[in-house]
C-alpha cells in the first residue's frame, strides 16, 4: 500500500487521461492521493476530483505564484471549499523567492492569512518553499509553541532547517528528486526524519523520479521514491509505503486511519507478535504514551489474543529470518501463552526471539529462563538506565527499587542457560547511553542503540 502526499491531478497535463493515471497508480498499489490546489482556478477542480475518485483528498489554497490575486472574494472561495468533507488541508500555500511572480511582501501577507485560516479551521497546512525556508520557519515560529499540523512538501533544506521544521510540528515529504544523482544533500537527511513524520510524494506532473526524469510524472511512480527511501531507513519499499500511508491518513483523515489492531506484523524480514498491551514499566519515552502503534501498524489491542488466534495470525511464517515477541506491551507477562505459541513455532523450525524489559523473573517470582529453554533462542533486553535511581525515575517499574538489579540478574540467568542476549537502549535525552553500553560490555553481551522519537516529533 502506497500513498502520494502531493499531487496536481487537476492540471492540464492530466486533462484527457486522469482516470487512466489513477488506474495505473492503483495497479502499482498507490491507493491514497492528496491533490492540492495551486492557482485560483484549481480550487473547484481539486474538490471535484476528490468527490469523483475514491482515495483522492483535496487541499484548498493558493500557491505563492498567485498571491497577488488573493483578494477577499478569492479568500472566501478557499474558505468555502474547506467546508467540503474531502477538502482536508489548507494548501498549497507558502513562499517562493526563486521566481518571485508575486512581490515578496504580498507573498508573506497572504501566507500569514492562510496560516490564520488553518488555525481557525483546525486543519493541516501544505507548505511550498523555494529559496524561502528561513522566512517560512521564522513565520511559523512567531505563532508560538503550539505545534502546527501539516506538511513541508518536497523538502530541500539543510539539517538545521529540518530540525526547525520538525520542532514546528510538521511532517516532511520527499519527492522524486531524491532519486537524482544531485540529491545527495537531501538524501542524507532521510535518516533524521522521525518515522511518524515521514511522507513521500510525486508533486506530479513535476519531478519525475529516475529513470523518468524530464517526463510527465504520475502517482504510479511513488514506489520508485519508496525504493530510494528504503535503504536510507533500513526498510523494504513496502515498509516505507505502509508507514507513509499510515502517517498521511493520520494527518488528513483520522476516521480512515482507524485500522484494526494487529497481532502479527512484518518489518523487513522479521515477523513480530503483539500479544499484550500490559507492561511492568511506564517509561517516560514509551511510544504508547502518545500513539497507537509503530511502523504503520496499529498495535493498541482491544483485548489479548488467545493462543489459537496468535497462531492463526502467524499463518504461513515461511521466509522470515526470525519471529519476535515484541508488541505494545511486555510479552513475558503472558508467559504461558508465549510459551505455547513459541513451542509450536520452534517445533516448526523457526528462530524465536523475545524483546523484553527483563523484569519477567521478578514479575513471576521464579526464573522463567529455565522454562523457555528449547523454545526461545534469544532475548533482547531493554535497559535504558545505567543505575538504580535512573532506572526507577525513567522506567517507573512496578517492582520499585529492586527492578534495576532484577534486569541485570535476568541477563545473567539467560547467559547462564546459553541464550543469545543483546541489550538495547533508547537514545533519549534522559538516558545515559554510554553507561548502558558499558554495562553491556562488562556482561559480555551485544549492545544496540535505538532511535528515539519524542511525542512532539
Image (cartoon, rainbow, N blue to C red):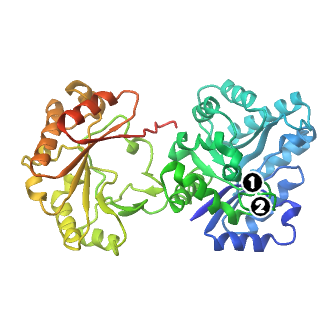
Q: Secondary structure at mark 2?
A: loop
User: Quarter-wise, where is residue 140 in the image?
Assistant: top right
Q: Secondary structure at mark 1?
A: loop
Crowding around mark 2 (Cα neighbors within 10 Å: few <14, some 14 to 19, many 20+) is many
Figure disc tally:
2
Residue where numbered disc 1 is placed = 203
Q: Is residue 389 above or below residue 29?
A: above
Which residue sits at x=69%, y=66%? 220
Residue where numbered disc 2 is placed = 217
Image coordinates of residue 38 in percent, x first then y, are: 83, 49
Which mark sits nearer the N-terminus, 1 or 2?
A: 1
Q: Is residue 385 visible?
A: no
Q: Is residue 14 above or below residue 204?
A: below
In the rendered image, which quarter contains the N terminus? bottom right
Q: Nearer the viewer, mark 1 or mark 2?
A: 2
Q: Are marks 1 and 2 in contact (CB under 8 Å)?
A: yes
Image coordinates of residue 448 in percent, x first then y, are: 33, 41
Residue 453 shown left or right of residue 203 in the figure: left
Residue 60 shown left or right of residue 69 in the figure: left
Q: CA distance from mark 1 to mark 2?
A: 8 Å
Image coordinates of residue 87 in percent, x first then y, are: 72, 55
User: Quarter-wise, where is residue 204 in the image?
Assistant: bottom right
Residue 174 shown left or right of residue 295 in the figure: right
Q: Nearer the viewer, residue 121 or 46?
A: 46
Q: Is residue 210 above or below residue 140?
A: below
Amino acid at each position: 500500500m502506497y500513498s502520494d502526499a502531493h499531487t496536481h491531478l487537476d492540471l492540464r497535463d492530466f486533462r484527457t487521461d486522469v482516470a487512466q493515471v489513477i488506474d495505473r497508480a492503483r495497479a502499482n498499489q498507490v491507493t491514497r492521493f492528496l491533490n492540492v490546489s495551486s492557482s485560483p482556478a484549481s480550487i473547484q477542480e481539486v474538490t471535484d476530483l476528490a468527490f469523483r475518485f475514491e482515495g483522492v483528498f483535496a487541499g484548498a489554497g493558493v500557491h505563492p505564484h498567485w498571491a497577488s490575486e488573493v483578494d477577499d472574494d478569492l479568500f472566501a472561495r478557499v474558505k468555502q471549499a474547506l467546508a467540503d468533507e474531502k477538502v482536508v488541508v489548507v494548501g498549497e500555500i507558502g513562499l517562493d523567492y526563486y521566481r518571485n511572480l508575486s512581490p515578496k511582501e504580498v507573498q508573506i501577507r497572504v501566507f500569514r492569512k492562510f496560516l490564520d485560516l488553518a488555525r481557525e479551521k483546525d486543519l493541516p497546512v501544505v507548505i511550498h518553499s523555494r529559496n524561502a525556508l528561513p522566512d517560512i520557519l521564522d513565520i511559523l515560529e512567531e505563532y508560538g509553541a503550539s505545534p502546527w499540523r501539516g506538511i513541508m512538501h518536497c523538502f530541500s533544506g539543510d539539517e538545521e532547517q529540518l530540525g526547525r521544521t520538525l520542532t514546528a510540528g510538521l511532517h516532511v515529504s520527499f519527492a522524486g528528486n531524491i532519486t537524482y544523482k544531485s540529491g545527495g544533500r537531501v538524501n542524507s537527511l532521510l535518516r533524521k526524519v522521525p518515522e511518524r513524520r515521514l511522507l513521500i510524494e510525486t508533486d506530479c506532473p513535476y519531478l519525475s523520479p529516475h529513470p523518468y526524469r524530464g517526463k510527465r510524472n504520475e502517482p504510479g511512480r511513488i514506489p520508485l521514491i519508496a525504493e530510494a527511501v528504503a535503504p536510507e531507513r533500513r526498510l523494504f519499499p513496502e515498509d516505507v509505503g505502509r508507514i507513509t500511508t499510515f502517517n498521511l491518513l493520520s494527518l488528513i483523515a483520522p476516521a480512515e486511519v482507524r485500522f484494526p489492531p494487529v497481532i502479527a506484523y512484518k518489518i523487513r524480514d522479521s515477523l513480530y507478535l503483539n500479544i499484550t498491551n500490559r507492561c511492568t514499566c511506564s517509561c517516560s519515552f514509551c511510544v504508547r504514551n502518545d500513539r497507537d502503534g509503530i511502523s504503520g501498524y496499529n498495535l493498541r489491542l482491544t483485548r489479548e489474543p488467545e493462543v489459537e488466534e496468535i497462531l492463526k495470525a502467524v499463518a504461513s511464517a515461511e521466509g522470515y529470518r526470525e519471529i519476535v515477541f515484541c508488541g505494545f506491551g511486555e510479552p513475558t507477562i503472558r508467559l504461558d501463552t508465549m510459551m505455547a505459541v513459541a513451542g509450536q513455532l520452534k517445533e516448526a523450525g523457526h528462530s524465536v526471539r523475545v524483546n523484553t524489559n527483563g523484569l519477567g523473573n521478578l514479575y513471576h517470582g521464579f526464573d522463567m529462563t529455565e522454562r523457555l529453554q528449547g523454545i526461545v533462542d534469544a532475548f533482547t533486553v531493554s535497559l535504558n538506565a545505567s543505575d538504580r535511581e535512573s532506572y526507577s525515575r525513567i522506567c517507573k517499574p512496578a517492582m520499585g527499587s529492586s527492578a534495576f538489579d532484577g534486569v541485570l540478574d535476568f541477563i545473567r540467568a539467560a547467559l547462564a542457560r546459553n541464550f543469545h542476549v543483546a541489550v538495547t537502549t533508547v537514545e533519549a535525552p534522559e538516558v545515559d547511553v554510554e553507561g548502558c553500553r558499558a554495562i553491556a560490555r562488562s556482561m559480555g553481551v551485544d549492545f544496540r542503540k535505538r532511535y528515539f522519537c519524542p511525542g512532539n516529533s
